[in-house]
Image (cartoon, rainbow, N blue to C red):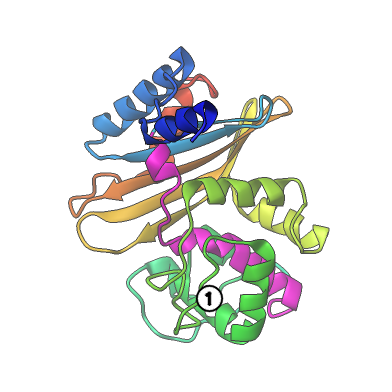
Amino acid sequence: MGIIQMVLAVALLLPVAKPAASPEDEAFVEAVNAVLAKHSTSGSFTLYDEQRQVFLRSDPDKSRTAEIPASTFKIPNSLIALQTGVVASPEEVIPWDGKERQIKSWNQDQTLASAVKFSTVWVFQGVARAVGRPAMQRFLDQLGYGNGQIGEAIDRFWLDGSLKVTPQQQIEFLRRLYHHQLPFEKRHMNAVQDMIVRKREDGYRLSGKTGWATLGDPDRGWFVGYLERQRQVWFFALLVDIHSDGRGRDRQGITEEILRELELIKP
């Protein structure tokens, strides 16, 4: 074995040193963890700064760990519903089936827009059944959404089934939606972007969708979306533990506190 080969062989056996965290990264992690500690829960927050084209991650491992998307899947499900014509428009009335459910706002006729607002599960289960397995799988493949696995139940795969997605993948999907780079008509992407606007304040607009994967104690909660301010945009994905006593439940509120700590929105 030559000298170069020996050096390479030894190098492969040596541990690879991780790059030191930058002061910016450390400040980001401290800000996120301070907010999570205030709410007596744990989790991760991933942010993509579109202007600088950089990711910031409070927990790099969790940022790349796949979880059930739960109701955050209502964003792609809405796009699929409109693109296939299963739902003609965001305002089309979807009749209530008359079954009383635990959440009062679900027990009425819905539109696609109201079903996103109230996170009405039965509407999107009906959408998935109407779309059907072949078309749904085709769209997931085209989107490259998470692991793309539907599994056995066409109307539950995003709730407690086999579909998994990472926080970073959530952000990548949202960026493509924002920039109209998904395989859907632009009018449908615009409609869904309008449906997920959560707050309009002086100087900024917050868009996003919550999700709650009921896995036990703790459950896992999402808030994914983006913040627009002065022609700038930041994409984010919060993934937090939700405990049986309610800790971690206010996913949008936690996210807004983090964004304030990061001085992206005003206190």
Q: Does the magenta stretch include residue 80?
A: yes
Q: Residues within 10 Å of mark 1 (few under 14, many from 20)?
A: many
- The residue shown at (52%, 34%) is 47
- Report x, y in % for residue 153: 45, 83
| Residue 213 relative to residue 227: left or right | left
Q: What stretch is highlighted in magenta?
A: 59-88
Q: Is residue 243 above or below residue 87?
A: above
Q: Is residue 84 above or below residue 112?
A: below
- The residue shown at (26%, 29%) is 38
- The part of the image, by quadrant, that contains residue 48 is top right
- The residue shown at (37%, 71%) is 160
State the residue position of label 1.
Answer: 123
- Report x, y in % for residue 55: 55, 32
Q: What element carries label 1?
A: helix
Q: Nearer the viewer, residue 67 or 208?
A: 67
Q: Nearer the viewer, residue 240 or 191?
A: 240
- Report x, y in % for residue 230: 71, 24
Total count of labels: 1
- The part of the image, by quadrant, that contains residue 53 is top right
Instruction: Please identify the residue farthest to the top as the structure is shown.
Output: 23
- Label 1 is placed on what type of residue? Val
Q: Main secondary structure of the magenta part?
A: helix
Instruction: Please identify the residue farthest to the front as the structure is shown.
Output: 1
Q: In this view, does 137 lie above or below 196?
A: below
